[in-house]
Image: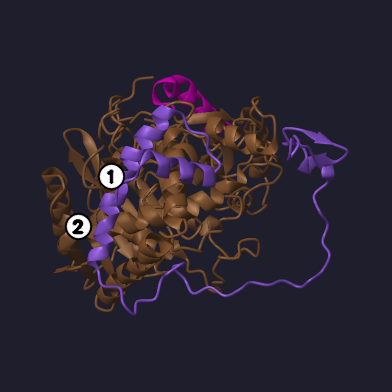
Chain colours: A brown, B purple
Amino acid sequence: MSVFDLTLQDIHSKLRNKELTVTDLVDASYRRIADVDGRIGAFLALDEENARRTAQQLDKQLGTDEPRGLLFGLPAGLKDNIVTAGLATTCASKFLSNYDPIYDATVVRKLRDAQAVTVGKLNMDEFAMGGSGENSAVKPTRNPWHPDHVPGGSSSGSAAAVAAGEVYFALGSDTGGSIRQPASYCGIVGMKPTYGLVSRFGLVAFASSLDQIGPLTKNVEDCAYVLQSIVGHDPQDSTSLNVTDIPDYLSALTGDIQGLRVALPKEYMGEGIDPRVKERVLEAIRVLESLGAVVEEVSLPHTEYAVAAYYLLASSEASSNLARYDGVRYGVRTDNAGNLLDVYRYSRSEGFGPEVKRRIMLGTYALSSGYYDAYYLKAQKVRTLIKRDFDNVFANYDVVVGPTAPTPAFKLGEQVGDPLTMYLNDILTIPVNLAGIPAISVPCGFADGLPVGLQVIGKALNESTVLRVAHAFERSTDHHKQRPQLKA
Amino acid sequence: MSISKQDVEHVANLARLELTDAEKEQFAEQLSAILKYAEQLSELNTDGIEPTSHPMPLLNVMREDEARPSWPLEEVLKNAPDEEDGQFKVPAVLE
């Protein structure tokens, strides 16, 4: 058993009782990385010297009365689109392969305040575009449950590192499912908070109206601890919500969901959903019912339009956001440039991978003269309809549940040549980003040895109820205690 | 909607991308498929529906117009591919 299988409270009590040191925890992380990451490919960079120095400082604090942070001593990994001063931040892109940020993202500062220890940066689909991890320009990440299968994406390294026991927790980012879908594929917990709850300052922008940072953990309680540590208003992010009374998420984990009203959208269990996934979700619903929740079928009628709307909107925002990569101020500049226009064109063409180019092309097209109304504006209006679907359901229900992804993890290479099929994997996660509401994926069993995730979706800023339902479910099952058999 | 190779070239120019012939052909095919899929949105009547650009109501966020310290120049230029005299350096705009 790994020390990372202990609960956060057990780890903290062992630290207090001097049965464990922060250095032991950091050692455990780097040892595990050395043992398994050659096969998993979760890490892009390690920050071992700094992590060990931090561990020593925290160990000194252990003997004192100084108050300890919520995440004291816990080894963490960060998706490589979260900027870290003095530690390379590449977005798994050739373009940023030499980028050495001069500032920390707000979440990095917050993790430091909570006294977590950053051990390194995690692999991802390039610029967070993808759902399999295969779009990393560096290397693909493999699913710890089966090396032939993808870990999901785009927070591929974040999910795989937590599932493989390389870190205690990780942060990822979720634009259309990029935390929840890999969490589902890797058998762990992943949460996308309400848009604006966690600062995006220092998150490399993909689609600014959809991006949100969130935790990937082994269980819901850890998720609540991490969430508590990273939320809050940030004047450096103009879209950050000014929430004055942040709830105590841990106190929401009561286990009591008696009488809670749960909606199951028929569209989330319809065509295209793997029957094994459907079966696991129906079992999960019986668990919720046995705990006293009232589950009823509802309709989110515009679900089938979400993927089309999302890919137009997200790609449009991406084409605009990625215009900053011009080879002038940072990043890798081409060697083939005679004039300034060539610097732009060749630096971008040499630096971006195929999926990034595809989305820039799609977004540029959707925003271009003559097509704006038909594509971009139309998609924005459909976004309103999708948001209203949720508003209507949430007028009568506390949460919406369903699968996180239509299938378990697919095989590496299986969908690489077929972007549209790959996009359709996000059909159940995308509507949540379009509506800006919170959702979690929690393990709900297996399909032929590969994990399946249950998604719990809540009202805006009602993370507490989402966590309460996920926690009550988790307490009644042992899916989250299963670990992949990775021999050292 | 079918995307021709010429459309791809036009969009690539707008996006400041230099594509190979193989890429142009592949993107023409893939973008056509994606846009064909996206056309299902036209089935929906959206008359009178307001577009959503952000999930939360957003207002302009202002701060006091006070001078604040800037980053040191050497930090700002640390990642520059080329620089001279404290400025980013690029090749000639016009040849």
Residue type marked 2: Tyr
Magenta span has A194?
A: no
Seen at 72% across and 33% down, the residue is B81
**Residue name at image x 47 percent, y 56 percent:** A368
Quadrant showing the N terminus of chain A: top left
Coordinates of residue A435 in the picture (x, y in percent) = 37, 66
Label 2 Cα crowd, 10 Å radius (few <14 / some 14-19 / many 20+): many
Residue at the disc numbered 1: B33
Q: Position of residue A405 (x, y in %)?
A: 26, 48
A321 over A422 or under it: above or below? below
Q: Is residue A226 visible?
A: no
Quarter of the C terminus of chain A within the rendering: top left
Crowding at mark 1 (Cα within 10 Å: few <14, some 14-19, many 20+)? some
Query: Which label sits in the foreground, 2 or 1?
Result: 1
What residue would you read off at disc 2?
Answer: A268
Q: Which residues are magenta?
A: A23-41
Q: Secondary structure at mark 1?
A: helix
Q: Quadrant of residue B51?
A: bottom left
Q: Is residue B48 left or right of residue A53?
A: left
Amino acid under disc 1: Ala
- Residue sitting farthest toward the right: B85
Main SS category, magenta section: helix
Is the Cβ of the residue at disc 2 closer than 8 Å to that at disc 1? no
Which chain hosts label 1? B
**Along the line of sight, the residue nearer the viewer: B35 or A251:** B35
Q: Is residue A264 above or below residue A127?
A: below
Task: Indicate the quadrant where residue A249 lies.
Answer: bottom left
| A184 left or right, relative to A92 | left
- Whether residue A40 is in magenta: the answer is yes
Residue A98: x, y in percent? 64, 30
The residue located at (56%, 65%) in the rendering is A240
